[in-house]
């Protein structure tokens, strides 16, 4: 089986699981050719050797010179004028100038697929380009839905139009499948499948357990963005410190909310208890986990967080909101602790309980690792996704 895999940005520090999935699909007999709309998210000297190789072997849409973009459009216009104008009309009707740019990229992707002899396009974080490619070229396409980004990035009619153009839609949690089904007419439901991601559990070793840490260190990993709700976490740290707890929090990642969060920490006089790590290397991230006593998410919306899987696999006690796909990962009180979403008081109660009970932290950590190993191992789950591709993609 040969497929094209179109990704919004590849490789990217926040989407390392896509690099792993491409590699593992190849192990299961799927010949994958990768196209990336954008180049890597970091300069070459910041990429790992594995990422450098992946970037070198990927076709970058936006790196194509203007002459080749024009040539791709001219050739497509003359060889399939009807479908070219249909795709152009859909782009104009859907979103104006921005969608014209997506249309330009779709033609480049379609011509690349023609040159490679590829007939199926699997799409991650670039559904609009995938849909337009599907409209113009005689290919099949499938879409991966990870959570907040895809469901919030466009209006419901556009999302349904994208889903309607796909042979199947892969959702990474049962919750995201239910949300996609809710957005679509029942006639589309049979093409919406749940197929979870996973992590390389064999490569992840448990972090050391600290019985009575001073200070008690909370860690968050991910973008600093409104939907992630880190302000709730800083509020909780401020309240815990007022109550006499020696606690600090490490925020690993960056994003549009960083300045506001720094100002919040200063306003609440906890700037010495909040560490803004920014984006870090894998080595630095591993070192941060070694000093973590509890991993905390305070998101207002999620898909099914890969960082939560990683922390659970490292046998770190995890605290997360009772939203979206998270209860599929955490059994409350067994493999982690859940709190009511956007409820600062419940978060403080949950963290207080965890800090005061080392035996509970140890038990949650061990059970969390067992759960991830049993249900979210990447090799096992990628093999299951490869079977879906073999079943749903007719042309091999």
Image (cartoon, rainbow, N blue to C red):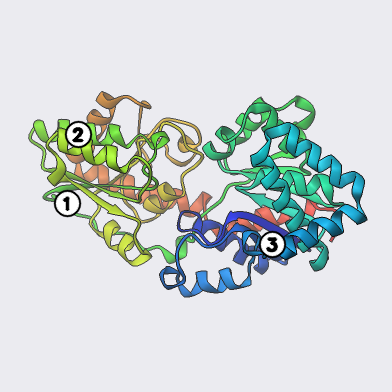
Left or right of 309: which side holds 269?
left
Q: Mark 1: give few (<14), some (14-19) or many (20+) Cα within 10 Å.
A: few
Q: Is residue 343 above or below residue 258?
A: above
Residue 85 shows up from this direction = yes
Please name the residue shown 58% across and 47% down the image.
196
Please provide percent x and percent y for residue 247: 15, 43
- Contact between marks 1 and 2 (CB within 8 A): the answer is no
Considering only order in the chain, which callout, 3 or 2, is on the residue closer to the N terminus? 3
Gap between marks 2 and 3, in whole Å?
A: 58 Å
Identify the residue under disc 3.
Answer: 66
Considering only order in the chain, which callout, 2 or 1, is on the residue closer to the N terminus? 1
Task: State the SS at label 3.
Answer: helix
Return the mark for residue 352: 2
Say which of 32 and 99 sits in front.
Answer: 99
Q: Quadrant of residue 60?
A: bottom right
Gap between marks 1 and 2, in whole Å?
A: 15 Å
Please provide percent x and percent y for residue 149: 54, 39
Q: Mark 2: give few (<14), some (14-19) or many (20+) Cα within 10 Å.
A: some
Considering only order in the chain, which callout, 1 or 3, is on the residue closer to the N terminus? 3
The mark lying in front, picked from 2 and 3, is: 3
Residue 194 shows up from this direction = no
């Amino acid at each position: 089986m040969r497929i094209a895999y179109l990704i919004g940005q590849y490789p990217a520090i926040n989407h390392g699981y896509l690099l792993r999935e491409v590699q593992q699909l190849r192990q299961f007999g799927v010949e994958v050719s990768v196209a990336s709309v954008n180049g890597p998210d970091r300069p070459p000297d910041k990429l790992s050797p594995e990422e450098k190789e992946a970037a070198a072997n990927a076709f970058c849409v936006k790196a194509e010179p203007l002459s080749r973009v024009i040539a791709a459009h001219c050739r497509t216009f003359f060889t399939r004028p009807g479908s070219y104008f249909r795709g152009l009309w859909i782009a104009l009707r859907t979103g104006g100038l921005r969608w014209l740019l997506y249309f330009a990229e779709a033609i480049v992707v379609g011509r690349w697929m023609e040159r490679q002899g590829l007939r199926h396009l699997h799409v991650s974080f670039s559904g609009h380009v995938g849909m337009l490619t599907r409209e113009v070229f005689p290919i099949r396409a499938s879409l991966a839905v990870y959570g907040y980004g895809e469901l919030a990035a466009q209006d419901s009619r556009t999302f349904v139009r994208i889903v309607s153009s796909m042979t199947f839609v892969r959702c990474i949690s049962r919750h995201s499948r239910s949300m996609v089904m809710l957005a679509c007419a029942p006639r589309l439901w049979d093409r919406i499948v749940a197929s979870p991601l996973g992590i390389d559990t064999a490569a992840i070793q448990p972090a050391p357990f600290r019985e009575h840490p001073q200070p008690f260190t909370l860690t968050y990993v991910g973008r600093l963005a409104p939907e992630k709700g880190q302000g709730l976490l800083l509020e909780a740290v401020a309240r815990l410190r007022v109550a006499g707890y020696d606690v600090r929090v490490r925020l690993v990642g960056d994003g549009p909310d960083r300045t506001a969060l720094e100002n919040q920490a200063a306003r609440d006089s906890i700037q010495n208890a909040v560490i803004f790590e920014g984006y870090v290397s894998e080595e630095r991230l591993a070192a941060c986990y070694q000093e973590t006593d509890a991993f905390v998410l305070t998101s207002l919306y999620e898909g099914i967080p890969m960082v939560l899987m990683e922390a659970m696999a490292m046998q770190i006690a995890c605290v997360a909101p009772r939203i979206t796909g998270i209860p599929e990962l955490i059994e409350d009180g067994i493999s982690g602790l859940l709190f009511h979403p956007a409820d600062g008081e419940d978060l403080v109660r949950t963290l207080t309980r965890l800090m005061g009970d080392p035996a509970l932290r140890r038990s949650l950590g061990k059970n969390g690792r067992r759960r991830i190993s049993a249900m979210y191992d990447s090799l096992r789950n990628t093999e299951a996704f490869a079977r879906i591709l073999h079943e749903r993609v007719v042309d091999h």
